[in-house]
Image (cartoon, rainbow, N blue to C red):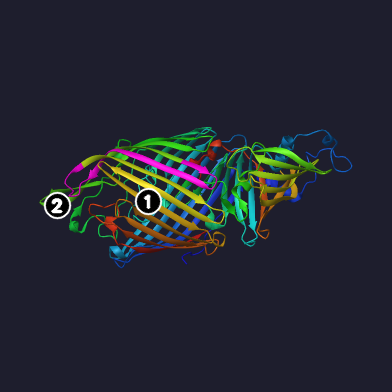
Amino acid sequence: MLHRLARCLVIVVVGAGLSLVSPVATSDGVPEAQAAEISAAEIVRKADEVRNPDESYFLRVEVQTSEHPDRPSEFEVSLLGNDKTLIKTVKPSRDRGRNMLMRGTEMWAYIPNLKRAVRVSLSQRLVGQAANGDISRMRWSGDYDAVIESQTERHWTLLLTANKTGLTYAKLRVVVAKGTYHPEKAEYLTATGRLLKKAEFAAYRELCGRQRPTEIRIQDGVRPDERAVIKVLAMEVRKFPASLFVPENLE
Amino acid sequence: MVCGGGCVASTVFAGDWEHSDDFELGYQGSYVFEARTLSRNRPYASAAHRTSVYSEESPTRWRLDASLRGWVDVRGDLENEVQPELDVRELSLSRADDYTDIRLGLQQIAWGETFGVPIADVVNPRDLRDPLFLEMDWVRRPTWTANVQVMVESLRLQAVATPLPRNNELPERGSAYDPFPPVLKGVEVEPQREFSLGRFGRDGEYGGRLGYLFDFGLDVGLLYFFHWNRVPVYELAMQGGRPVVVPFQDRIHTAGITVSMAFEDWVLRGDGVMHGNVPWMTRDLQGTRRIDYLQAIVGVDRTTESGWTLGAQFHIDYRGDRMLTWGSGRIQKSLWDGDLEPQIFAYIGVDNTDRWVQPRIDWHVLSLWTLSVRADLVWGTTGDRAGDLGFIDGRHRVMMWTSLRL
């Protein structure tokens, strides 16, 4: 049986150039449909579709930090809907089993020596500059209210404000490409607007039938030398039982 | 180093099957200063395997878990007795869909939110041969249990039945943590009752838990478990003209509540359990009395952006006619991007003489290799202001644990 993950990997490797969802573009690369008004919420929803192939999917990601570029961490991420995420640590070996579950804005970590899940705060760091929320919270729709701050011929700049407490970031400023709805850059801000981190969504490649960013390059807002790169190694649409996403079953 | 090589770890995807394996080799050594001996001298190996089967069309999953740990302990405190053990830690089959998760077989079930003293963790018996070692994956004794969970949105219901229970493993007579006072040296202690297959179900333990995660972040669990008093009450009896210490075991009802809530960097935790009509040991071992035994722990911890973890807990025990309270705290700092984790844990009696301080440092030397060194400094008395640590007063120790994960 051909595994869907294998299919995704094949698509990535071969780099099939046929984009299934490319909008019709004008001569300057901006689709005609863009001329019509589009709401900020709709832009965010379409940008989410770029990063998320389905309601339920699987990711394998590598996180490389500037402190230890030679020692990348690797995680398997299972996402169900907008608010359920399971992160399993694959590398380094010493951390294998230190898995995390996120339901809504609540988070649990599995402690292997205790063999149980313990409640943790969402702001705990995964590794280096990568917070748990950077991987587990792949959708902005639903979590944030958006307004269009500014726009150019090619980009919208959106300001997203959290509509619930407990999120890793209170505000985001996101740059989305017109036409493709590719998120390109983001600034992660505190509620008062102080810059926490910058992120760049890069290395767009064909993944699960669409051009998607396979790298999120994160830079500390205060210490620019501190960086992390989240690389998507594999992506697969998969069905997960909802009962997998409860703290009692985190292990 | 203990690893002999030839170890493999992998997660392989193949069709609708998912396999994962985990291997660990290590050594635990514990030196008790007062007795000038090794209370733990244990090279060990463990292996775990998981196979998951899932369908492309439905979210239903089947899973097989198997885990085994083996060691040889050459105990200096028991005249260099060699104790080889092979411990099946898990052998279970489970089926999960959107609303149910049914797991049958040898397993551990963890309840509770707080740290240090696992008062709500009542489903599995424990290995208490080293009472200062609280790594629950080593302490919990797995049981053959049916574990059925039903989840509907934020509501979780769990029913647990163990038809053939196990006892706690208690410190050996003459060991560094022998709980019997010196006056009973040489007095025979009868073993605990064995739960035989012939009484399958009739000696069973059962109960359940109801959990609900409120929208505003409060996670509440209500639990009930009907189980044996796994630390037996001992009575002094005369058999054939000589004194014998006889264990008294009975089943008791335990009901409790667990809570947790996170606020930004802070997490509040609490556990409370009530053991009803518990057999309780008298000081002179003459007969057994019954008490209602209430235990509660509330605590708060905070993890900062700069890698500090700070935790504090308040413990209350109400034992029939006596109340005891303790405070505990933990400070941990993550250094070198998590490679070095020094921490200190303290457990101090408020109205009693218990004192337990545990400085510890974990060093992740390599990706695969971890070295951990800790000390346990314990004080207590057996008089009127006694807490729980009087029986190991002054038995300070240092422990080294090194492990290689593959």
Q: Is residue A82 visible?
A: yes
- Between B301 and B394, the one lying in front of the other is B301
**Which region shows up in magenta?**
B260-288
Which image quarter: residue B79?
A: bottom left
Q: Residue furthest front?
A: A192
Q: Amino acid under label 1?
A: Gly
Q: Main secondary structure of the magenta part?
A: strand
Q: Is residue A59 magenta?
A: no
Residue underneath mark 1: B327
- Residue A47, image x, y percentages: 73, 40
Earlier residue among tags 2 and 1: 2
Vertical placement of residue B59 versus B329, above or below: above
Vertical placement of residue B347 versus A46, above or below: below
SS category of the residue bearing label 1: strand
Residue underneath mark 2: B243
Q: Residue at x 35, y 50 (%)?
A: B326
Mark in the foreground, 2 or 1: 1
Q: CA distance from mark 2 to mark 1?
A: 39 Å
Q: Tell me how many marks there are.
A: 2
- Residue B126, image x, y percentages: 35, 49
- Between B187 and A200, the one lying in front of the other is A200
- Between A59 and A148, the one lying in front of the other is A148
SS category of the residue bearing label 2: strand
Neighbourhood count class around disc 2 (C-alpha, 10 Å): few under 14, some 14–19, many 20 upward? some
